[in-house]
Image (cartoon, helix red, strand yellow):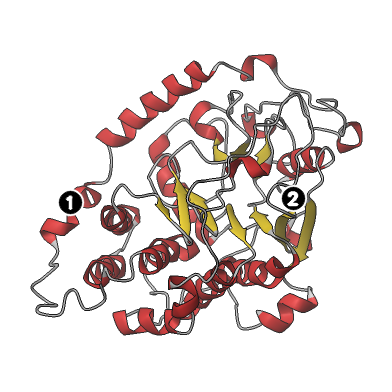
């Protein structure tokens, strides 16, 4: 899910590689995937894994703001006032696996953090005592990461969870610019396939936030053993069940399609099913917000060959140790030196041609959007509310959860 090479131009390669490598590349680590679970998920299993958190997740107990508290954009590398309380950046890792990957991304993050007052949480998933106590049952690193995040979430007010290959390209932003205080968990869509991304997210220290992460981690034990997309595949149905608990037949339909997936194209039918069930809504107060493609705090860098504009904050897919490695068209002239960062833009050694106007990025995104639309996997083009039942199986109790 987190591979990048500047020499590769085929977006279709990336669609397959990103999902395939979700079983190879960890959150901030590079490890072989453990054998997939052979336990097959059924509707009753989905309900069971959510049951103990249902009250907290579906009935938030705190008052909700009617309007979002807008955070002022950062100007001229100025301070980031703690309008939403303490903000922490969470990075989970296995130390032995960090030596050969992600140096460019991690150096850019380190540079950025020297100019702000956020708390950094570097958590070794294999050695951290709190993680070992609370998450020892998790064997797959993807799910252990989310469990670990739930363990450390009570130490802060808001937590930004990042993939190791996510780097800062434009430090003139504050994390709070993407915090929406009407919700507790914030995600964004991958640009090339509309999938809700699992690697980078924002979560509030709340009953909902903690339990959402715990339940996400527990999916390791009931995920299907087919081509399932790992924690990213789980996330699609996980969100649907939480934000639309009354859409039980729709969730069952998507679950059935998920179990039938045998490759990327048929997996995308499942992603489309969930997206159609969620509809155009992107915000469920007290629960979840999903930023539309290219509007979150991070987007895939390969789509614009790492060109960026002032609206960008972070780019995803920086795997390499060194700028220019394997022909990678990095936005930097060379590896950043964190010792030179801290005040203003000192230490940020950009390639001038990589910083472009927003209209240039818009044009490239539009071209990519048209291309992906024309070549989208055929199994994912069905209208699931026409090809799958929404009454025939559940009648006369289809609205029992409404």
Above or below residue 373? Residue 2 is below
Quick one: quadrant of the C terminus?
bottom left
The residue carrying pointer 1 sits among few (fewer than 14), some (14 to 19) or many (20 or more) residues within 10 Å by Cα, namely: few
Q: Residue at x 52, y 71 (%)?
A: 61
Q: CA distance from mark 1 to mark 2?
A: 42 Å
Q: Of residues 134 and 138, which is closer to you in this image?
A: 134
User: Mark 1 falls on what kind of element?
Assistant: loop
Image x and y of residue 177, in percent:
62, 40
Q: Residue at x 25, y 70 (%)?
A: 256
Above or below residue 93? Residue 317 is above
The residue carrying pointer 2 sits among few (fewer than 14), some (14 to 19) or many (20 or more) residues within 10 Å by Cα, namely: few
The residue that label 1 is drawn on is 382
Which quarter of the picture shows residue 308? top right
The residue that label 2 is drawn on is 100
Is residue 240 in view? yes
Q: Of residues 44 and 331, which is closer to you in this image?
A: 44
Q: Which of pointers 1 and 2 lies earlier in the amino acid sequence? A: 2
User: Mark 2 falls on what kind of element?
Assistant: loop
Image x and y of residue 341, in percent:
86, 33
Q: Is residue 141 left or right of residue 370?
A: right
Above or below residue 163? Residue 237 is below
Q: Of residues 233 and 345, which is closer to you in this image?
A: 345
Q: Is residue 338 left or right of residue 290?
A: right
Is residue 29 in view? no
Which quarter of the picture shows residue 106? top right
Image x and y of residue 135, in percent:
65, 79
């Amino acid at each position: 899910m987190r591979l990048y090479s500047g020499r590769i131009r085929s977006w279709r390669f990336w669609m397959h590689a990103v999902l395939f490598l979700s079983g190879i590349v960890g959150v901030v680590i590079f490890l072989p995937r453990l054998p997939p679970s052979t336990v097959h998920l059924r509707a009753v299993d989905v309900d069971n894994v959510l049951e103990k958190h249902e009250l907290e997740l579906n009935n938030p107990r705190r008052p909700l703001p009617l309007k979002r508290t807008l955070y002022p954009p950062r100007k001229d590398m100025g301070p980031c006032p703690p309008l939403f309380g303490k903000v922490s950046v969470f990075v989970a890792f296995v130390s032995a696996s960090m030596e050969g990957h992600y140096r460019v991304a991690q150096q850019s993050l380190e540079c950025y953090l020297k100019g702000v007052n956020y708390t950094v949480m570097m958590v070794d998933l294999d050695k951290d005592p709190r993680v070992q106590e609370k998450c020892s049952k998790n064997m797959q690193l993807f799910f252990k990461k989310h469990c670990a995040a739930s363990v450390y979430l009570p130490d802060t007010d808001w937590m930004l969870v990042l993939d190791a290959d996510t780097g800062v390209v434009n430090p003139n932003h504050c994390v709070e610019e993407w915090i929406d205080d009407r919700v507790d968990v914030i995600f964004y869509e991958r640009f090339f396939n509309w999938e809700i991304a699992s690697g980078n997210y924002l979560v509030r220290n709340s009953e909902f936030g903690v339990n959402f992460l715990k339940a996400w981690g527990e999916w390791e034990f009931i995920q299907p053993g087919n081509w399932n997309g790992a924690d990213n595949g789980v996330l699609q149905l996980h969100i649907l069940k939480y934000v639309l608990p009354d859409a039980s037949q729709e969730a069952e339909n998507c679950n059935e399609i998920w179990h039938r997936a045998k490759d990327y194209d048929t997996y995308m039918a499942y992603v489309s099913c969930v997206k159609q069930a969620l509809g155009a809504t992107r915000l469920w107060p007290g629960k979840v917000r999903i930023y539309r493609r290219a509007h979150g705090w991070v987007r895939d860098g390969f789509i614009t060959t790492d060109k960026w504009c002032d609206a960008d904050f972070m780019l995803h897919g920086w795997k390499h140790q060194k700028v220019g490695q394997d022909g990678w068209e990095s936005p930097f002239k060379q590896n950043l030196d964190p010792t030179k960062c801290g005040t203003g833009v000192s230490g940020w050694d950009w390639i001038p041609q990589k910083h472009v106007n927003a209209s240039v990025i818009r044009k490239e995104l539009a071209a990519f959007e048209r291309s992906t639309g024309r070549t989208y996997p055929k199994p994912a083009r069905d209208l699931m509310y026409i090809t799958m039942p929404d009454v025939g199986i559940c009648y006369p109790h289809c609205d029992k959860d409404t």
